[in-house]
Amino acid sequence: MTTGIHHVAVRVRDLERSIAFYERHFGLSVASRATLGSGARIAFLAHPAGGAQLELIAGLHDHLDGDGLVHHVAFGVADVPAAFARLREAGVELLEDAPQTLASGRQLFSCRGPDGERLQVSGG
């Protein structure tokens, strides 16, 4: 039986640029870094509140048949409209004109990270 989600890995082109993006816009910080035997560099980013980590991988050149694609990484926020406004003001590419409200009342929107990865911002 699993104990929860440990991390989600996202391939990136520029590790430092991606670290700066996630630090600035999502409050993550580097928990650890490593260089793999292949030469790929990785960084695990953590949120101060804990939970799953985001692994950024730069320089990974192998792609095996069956490797999945990450559809999106979702970040929880207390105030979705405020997060939307803050990211829009910062020039982050937003995929909607405004946050969506689901039938359950939960609000969310999507944006792009520095390598085009799809990110979702969701309220409780």
Image: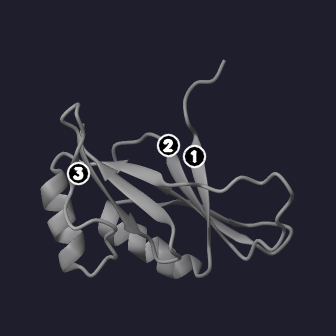
Q: Give the mark toward the camera: 2 or 3.
A: 3
Quadrant where the C terminus is found in the figure: top left
Quadrant where the N terminus is found in the figure: top right
Q: Relative to 7, is 83 above or below?
A: below
Q: Are marks 1 and 2 in contact (CB under 8 Å)?
A: yes
Q: Earlier in the sequence, mark 3 or mark 1?
A: 1
Q: Label 1 amino acid?
A: His
Q: Label 2 amino acid?
A: Ala
Secondary element under disc 2, as helix, strand or loop, is loop
Image position, residue 56 (x, y; %): 59, 64
Q: Earlier in the sequence, mark 2 or mark 3?
A: 2
Secondary element under disc 1, as helix, strand or loop, is strand
| Residue to which mark 2 is pinned | 52
- The disc placed on residue 7 is 1
C-alpha distance separating marks 1 and 2: 5 Å
Residue at 58%, 50% in the rendered image: 8
Direction from residue 70 to residue 117 in the image, left or right: left
> Outermost residue toward the front?
103
Question: Does any portion of residue 74 appear in the rendered image?
Answer: yes
C-alpha distance separating marks 3 and 1: 26 Å
- The disc placed on residue 58 is none
Residue at 15%, 50% in the rendered image: 79
Res. 91 image quadrant:
bottom left
| Residue to which mark 3 is pinned | 100
Q: Earlier in the sequence, mark 1 or mark 2?
A: 1
Direction from residue 75 to residue 58 in the image, left or right: right
Residue at 49%, 81% in the rendered image: 17
Direction from residue 52 to residue 34 in the image, left or right: right
Category of crowding for the residue at label 1, using alpha-carbon neighbours closer than 10 angstroms: few (below 14), some (14–19), many (at least 20): some
C-alpha distance separating marks 2 and 3: 25 Å
Q: Label 3 amino acid?
A: Gln
Secondary element under disc 3, as helix, strand or loop, is strand
